[in-house]
Image (cartoon, rainbow, N blue to C red):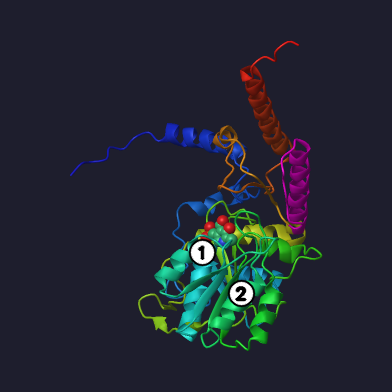
Amino acid sequence: MSTVEPRDLKPVWEQLGRQYADDGRMNLGFPGATDITYEDLAHLWSGSLLNNIGSPYDGGHGRNHTKDLEVQIVNMVADIVGAPASRWGYVTDGATEGTEHALLDARRRFPDAVIYASAAGHYMLGELAEKLMMPLVVIGVDDGGGIDVADLAGELARRRDRAAVIVAVAGTTMTEAVDDVPAIVAACDRLSITRRRIHVDAALSGLPLALVPVDGVPRVDFSVRGVTSTVVSGHKFLSTLEPCGVLVYRDQPLAAAAGRVSYTGTASVTLAGSRSGHTTLKLYKSLAGLGTEAHRSRVRACRDTAAYACERLRRIGVDAQRHPHAFTVFFPPPPPELTQRWVVPADDRCAHLICMPQVTRSDVDRFVADWQALVGRRRGLLGARRPAMAAT
Ligand SMILES: Cc1ncc(COP(=O)(O)O)c(C=O)c1O
């Protein structure tokens, strides 16, 4: 067996620190906020294992957990998204885990349930459907990038005898479009589909939209009758700096009735076994430490920067677009030289930048200036290659 000799890791940490700082300055494309930091929690970082194993609602045998704070976090998020007192939830390792929990709950209630989600839904949905062995019907998107409710109604009508679990999206990955959840509920009502669950994947936009609603953008929270669960990512708007999420149900899921496991002394109600208690500390600082008014200001600042970015890009001739609530500005794929320099995800139709709180107007200016310079260089090259005009 080979052995690992201890080594001096200081240079490794220093190099990584420099690398992440440099990368951070060029990352405009992924929606992770980094403006809230956690130096004040450093003393809790080392020296204790914090494990929120099992249900947040009972401590279990171990005492080294942060479940009291976890329940407060669930309640804070539930209050923001308007969940009633019957709410239930927990801190997940991301929005994807929350959606999986909701899908599993739907399947337990209705073994014949069919999942419906738009083509602009998150790429992990296909994997989740496969893993849970549930059929997935992919619905088209409308002109605004949200689920095409007429198409959805047609697909629901074809399977009226089957239960439906509809995964609506609040903030599609590429354009941050929002599905019209009230219209989805109305479509189910019209078709008398009562064996149904409506889960809102609100990974990025759920909190911003609930904190600062925008006229004309449909509500996606629990004020919409019929929404049964929602999930938000913690590492997106809340700046936890590590992947996590908060799942909230309107009423207890079936899993909540699970009995206690004798070894842990707590019910196994989550998808994971052991869960980080440190993540909860960060969520608690972000939510309770700042308070909702500060988060509202963060939402407004992001939207302002996004409006600025959209305008700046248009001024250099880029067909940039943005939904009125969105932090995201999307546009046709830029030249590859630009996406090699900047972290800006692109598919064959569209690319985007996302104005999270740490993204400043001067970051936008640098990006726009780079794009403009590239276009200028290309024009120059084209001009140089063009054959000289014949003299008349
Ligand atoms: C619409 C949507 N849902 C889910 C996710 C995944 O969230 P998480 O990384 O918290 O699992 C994303 C991530 O980009 C997303 O855009």
Crowding at mark 1 (Cα within 10 Å: few <14, some 14-19, many 20+): many
Name which quarter of the figure residue 139 lies in.
bottom right
Residue 380, visible in the rendered structure: yes
Residue that carries the numbered disc 1 in the rendered image: 96
Establish if 14 lies above or below 243: above
Establish if 122 lies above or below 168: above
Magenta stretch: residue 47 in it? no
Is the CB atom of the residue marked by disc 1 within 8 angstroms of ligand 1's nearest atom? yes
Q: What secondary structure prevails in the magenta region?
A: helix
Q: Nearer the viewer, residue 191 or 297?
A: 191
Residue 150, numbered circle: none
Apparent side of residue 76 relative to residue 125 in the rendered image (left or right): right
Q: Which amino acid does label 2 sit on?
A: Leu
Residue that carries the numbered disc 2 in the rendered image: 152
Q: Nearer the viewer, residue 146 or 167?
A: 146
Residue 84, visible in the rendered structure: no
Q: Which amino acid does label 1 sit on?
A: Thr
Apparent side of residue 194 relative to residue 80 in the rendered image (left or right): left
For the C terminus, the image quarter is top right
Q: Give the range drawn in magenta.
A: 296-325
- Asked if the residues shown at circle 2 and circle 1 are in contact, with their CB atoms under 8 angstroms apart, the answer is no
